[in-house]
Image (cartoon, helix red, strand yellow):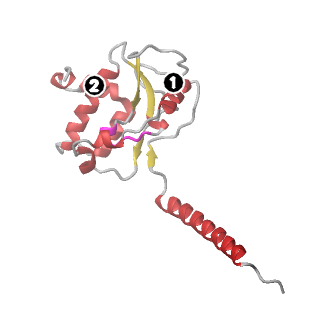
Amino acid sequence: MKTKSIKTILADIKTIVAIIILILILLIKLYLGPSEITLGPRTKTSGCQVSRALQDQACTPGAIIKGVTREQICATGYSKEVRDVSEEEKEDVFREYGIKHHKPGQYEVDHLVSLELGGSNGIANLWPEAAKPYPGYHEKDRVENYLHRQVCNGNMSLEEAQRQIANDWLSIYERMPETARRKE
């Protein structure tokens, strides 16, 4: 019978430990599940079209950060802490919507469900929102701020605000009090 050298035994142990670590990582991911929850099926990744200043629901159904709470989103600095959209991801969004060229300020890669309402940075929650025609991304920012105040003041649940903005932010803008529509 041939005996293994110490080096061979150590190499075998390292391999076994690496496999165990990989299995543990996979089990943790399986247990925790995805870090975001999409608010509808994402059935398209190209040929996306904006209609009436609204995103293409098939491309951008909206997505939220799993487990986010009212207390978290109402804490000062929350959105800055979680904002994480790379330039590459922004370019992917423009590509999906067929926008090959644009001027600075013409579009904003926007979170459909805003970060301040627990929206995720995932592509299912991003779309290229134009500044013009009105209402554009500046007006949607006012909707986001209005809904954030409603949630943090206890006038609306976080889930309701997320659902409303994902379904039709434009209708919310049209129903908002005139004071909330004005530039802040």
Q: Residue furthest front?
A: 6
Q: Is residue 137 above or below residue 66?
A: above
Q: Residue furthest right?
A: 1
- Residue 65, given in percent of the width and then of the height, sits at 39, 47
Task: Tell me which residue sits at (52%, 40%) in the image.
Answer: 41
Task: Tell me which residue sits at (30%, 21%) in the image.
Answer: 138
- Classify residue 15 as left or right of residue 3: left
Q: Is residue 146 visible?
A: yes
Q: Which residue is mark 2?
A: 173
- Residue 29, given in percent of the width and then of the height, sits at 51, 59
Task: Tell me which residue sits at (24%, 50%) in the image.
Answer: 71
Q: Is residue 109 above or below residue 81?
A: above
Q: 41 or 81: which is nearer to us?
A: 81
Question: What's the amino acid at mark 1?
Answer: Phe
Distance from the alpha carbon under mark 1 to that under mark 2: 25 Å
Within 10 Å of the Cα at label 2, are there few (<14), some (14-19), or many (20+) other Cα atoms?
Answer: many
Q: Quadrant of residue 173?
A: top left
Mark 1 or mark 2, earlier in chain: 1
**Over which residues does the magenta segment extend?**
115-121
Q: Nearer the viewer, mark 1 or mark 2?
A: 1
Q: Quadrant of residue 120?
A: top left
- Residue 75, given in percent of the width and then of the height, sits at 22, 46
Q: Which residue is mark 1?
A: 94
For the N terminus, the quadrant is bottom right
Task: Tell me which residue sits at (37%, 40%) in the image.
Answer: 119
